[in-house]
Image (spheres, rainbow, N blue to C red):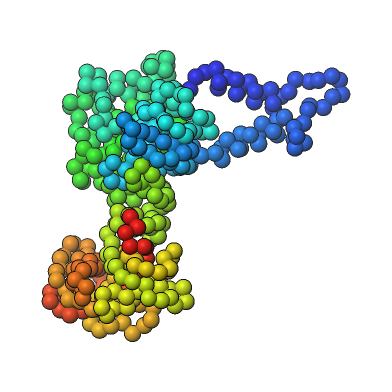
Amino acid sequence: MRTVEPALKRALARRHDEHPEPGPAGEKPREDAQGRSPGASRQAAIESERQAPAVELRGVCVHYKGVAALNGIDLEIRHGEFFSLLGPSGCGKTSTLSAIGGFVDLDDGDILIEGQSMRHIPAHRRPVNTVFQSYALFPHMSVAENIAFGPRMTGKSRGEIAPLMANALRLVSLAGMEERRPSQLSGGQQQRVALARALVNRPSVLLLDEPLGALDLQLRKHMQLELSRIQREVGITFIYVTHDQEEAMTMSDRIAVMDRGGVVQVGTAREIYDRPANLFVANFIGSSNVLTGEIVGEDKGVSVVRLGAASIVRARAGSVGHGRVSIVVRPDHMHLARSPAGTPLENSIPGKISKIAFLGTHLHVAVRVESGVEISITRALSSESGDEFTFAVADAVHVVWPVARSLSFPEGSE
């Protein structure tokens, strides 16, 4: 919650700049160093503030009992963005959220919200609200009382609270449940109450710490769509913590993949999936086939790699110039052929089908290649195409994929 005094000072300063007091007769208002009038100067400052990130982390470091949880994180989150922090347990994503919310002290660096440093601002005075996995609803209060708690703490009257609560209930589709207690609600409904309580004061930033973790799979998927809808409607910056890659990719405008207390890569779901920054991201986001080999040459910007004793494949060179490499190929970028592909634009290695699994919308095929590695291939099924899958377990096949879909990283680069 922002204090009134700084906001009042800004409003008075803006009013003074836009309507300066008259000087001596005939004297024009003073101009700034760029020759702009005070009003124009203030407008330029306002535009600059709008262009600043909603949240910015600058070299943020946090230690717990001498152990580094965050190692100099730099991050910019845009206004009105659904931004996810994604990574395995212990990577630092919850610590990052806690640092933004003011629940942990920084050992170094700074956090800015709407351009204002939060270094010495306590949690209860920051323009953020948090939705926790446990929901943290007051069990003795009704839905209405839980939602109204925040506005009451800010000194709003009943007349002011009523429309805010009605809008919050509408937003989360809970109208008509005002008098129920949390114990009378389902898990999904409790999650909606927690969300409404966090949104009713219209914070600049909403922090969400794995809020769907306690829900069953079907309800979780439904709430992912609901959260996306609500975020678009209210236009507030959401910062979401999850270890579920599908969840992050479903809802997020951008994702920060974290590992060992640092940010490894930031981008859209498509950017991270198609162009992972390193082997860790490639393995963590989606499924990947990893083939190891030795670079034996280069041909027009493409690395030539020997796999095992016989197979030669090609991969986008990237930053790997020589030595042993790991080649990463997504299962959906591979397909099967009876004989080697005849075009230089594709790679091909021989193998034998070891498993075929029908998964409704697609087939999963496992092929063991000459090096002993088992490669996974996914093949989408279409009821309209009429095509038949003609391969069987134990068939000798070639696994084929485009050179452009091969990503190469130094071996052990995780």
Q: Which residue is drawn at 17% across and 80% down?
A: 396
Look at the image and tell me in which quarter the N terminus lies.
top left
Q: Position of residue 59 (x, y in %)?
A: 46, 39
Quadrant where the C terminus sits is: bottom left
User: Relative to 53, does residue 155 appear above or below in the rendering?
Assistant: above
Q: Position of residue 81 (x, y in %)?
A: 44, 42
In front: 53, or 367? 367
Taking 208 as reference, is 302 above or below it? below
Whether residue 141 is visible to the viewer of this picture, yes or no, is yes
Say whether residue 364 is left or right of residue 235. left
Please tell me which residue is depicted at 15% across the width and 65% down the height of the picture.
Answer: 357
| Placement of 26 over or under 374, stated as above or below | above
Between 134 and 397, the one nearer to me in the picture: 397
Whether residue 226 sits left or right of residue 263 in the image: it is: left
Q: Which residue is painted at 28% across and 46% down in the image?
A: 88
Percent of width and height locating residue 23: 81, 20
Q: How many labels does the image show?
A: 0
Q: Residue furthest right?
A: 26
Q: Residue at image x 23%, y 36%?
A: 188
Residue 130's image quarter?
A: top left
Residue 107, percent from left and from top: 42, 31
Residue 85 visible, this orientation: no
